[in-house]
């Protein structure tokens, strides 16, 4: 009887670990909740694309609800997302700030010239340090920030029309009141 109990404990531990692993496989890594939601935007002072003598800070956006869209010219999913960002920028009064991540400025300029520039401004994070502060896993990523500089929404991966209509626009309406 003692010998059979000895095998039940490891079996129980194995079943518990397998259940956790199985549950983890069903999670979408793009829906990982950001620890930055509800916190102030990390400080930055970055050069503006094609105006490297001019710096732009997150403090310049205080008092406005705004979107920060992380993109790069070398990013395939950014191109998929781009028409949605363009349409969003045209159809709302919320400023959209482009955050060019680990990219060559000339390549970013050419990419925006070719595909359209929906951004009020584009800041350049050449080495990706500020992106790390924002918890950027890759590109594209999008943040919605309130008037007080608090991050209220983060999307990892390309935005979809559903994201805009079901998540972002209702949140903008709420934050604009």
Image (cartoon, rainbow, N blue to C red):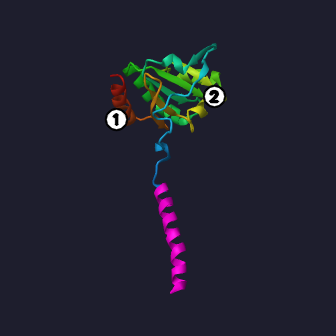
Instruction: Report x, y in % for residue 49.
Output: 60, 18
Is most of the magenta stretch helix, strand or loop? helix
The numbered dot on residue 103 is 2
Residue at x 45% of width, y 33% of height: 38
Q: Position of residue 42 (x, y in %)?
A: 55, 28
Residue at image position (43%, 29%) is 84
Q: Which mark is residue 166?
A: 1
Q: Which mark is residue 116?
A: none
Label 1 crowd (10 A; few <14 / some 14-19 / many >=20): few
- Magenta span: 1-24
Q: Viewer-nearest of labels 1 and 2?
A: 1
Taking 152 as reference, is 112 left or right? right
Location of residue 123 by image quarter: top right
Asked whether the beta carbons under mark 1 and mark 2 sit within 8 Å of each other, the answer is no
Q: Along the line of sight, which residue is nearer the eye, 146 or 97?
A: 146
Residue at 33% x, 30% y is 170
Does 110 sit left or right of 36 as displayed?
right
Q: CA distance from mark 1 to mark 2?
A: 31 Å
92 relative position to 151: left or right? left
* Label 1 secondary element: helix
Residue 23 on the magenta span: yes
Q: Verify whether residue 12 appears in magenta.
A: yes
Classed neighbour count for the residue bearing mark 2: other residues with Cα under 10 Å, few (<14), some (14–19), many (≥20): some
Q: Residue furthest bottom?
A: 1
Labels 1 and 2: the sequence-earlier one: 2
Q: Is residue 102 visible?
A: no
Residue 72 shows up from this direction: yes
Q: Secondary structure at mark 2?
A: loop
Question: Which image quadrant: the C terminus?
Answer: top left
Left or right, 175 with reference to 22: left
């Amino acid at each position: 009887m003692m010998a059979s109990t000895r095998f039940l404990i490891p079996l129980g531990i194995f079943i518990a670990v397998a259940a956790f692993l199985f549950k983890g496989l069903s999670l979408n890594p793009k829906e990982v909740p950001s620890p930055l939601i509800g916190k102030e935007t990390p400080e930055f002072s970055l050069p503006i694309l094609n105006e490297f003598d001019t710096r732009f800070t997150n403090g310049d956006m205080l008092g406005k609800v705004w979107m920060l869209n992380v993109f790069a010219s070398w990013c395939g999913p950014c191109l998929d997302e781009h028409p949605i960002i363009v349409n969003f920028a045209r159809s709302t009064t919320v400023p959209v700030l482009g955050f060019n991540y680990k990219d060559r400025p000339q390549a970013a300029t050419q990419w925006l010239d070719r595909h359209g520039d929906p951004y009020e401004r584009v800041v350049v994070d050449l080495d990706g340090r500020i992106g790390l502060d924002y918890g950027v896993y890759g590109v594209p990523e999008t943040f919605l920030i309130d008037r007080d500089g608090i991050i209220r929404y983060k999307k990892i991966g390309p935005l979809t029309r559903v994201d805009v209509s079901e998540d972002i626009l209702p949140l903008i309406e709420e934050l604009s009141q």
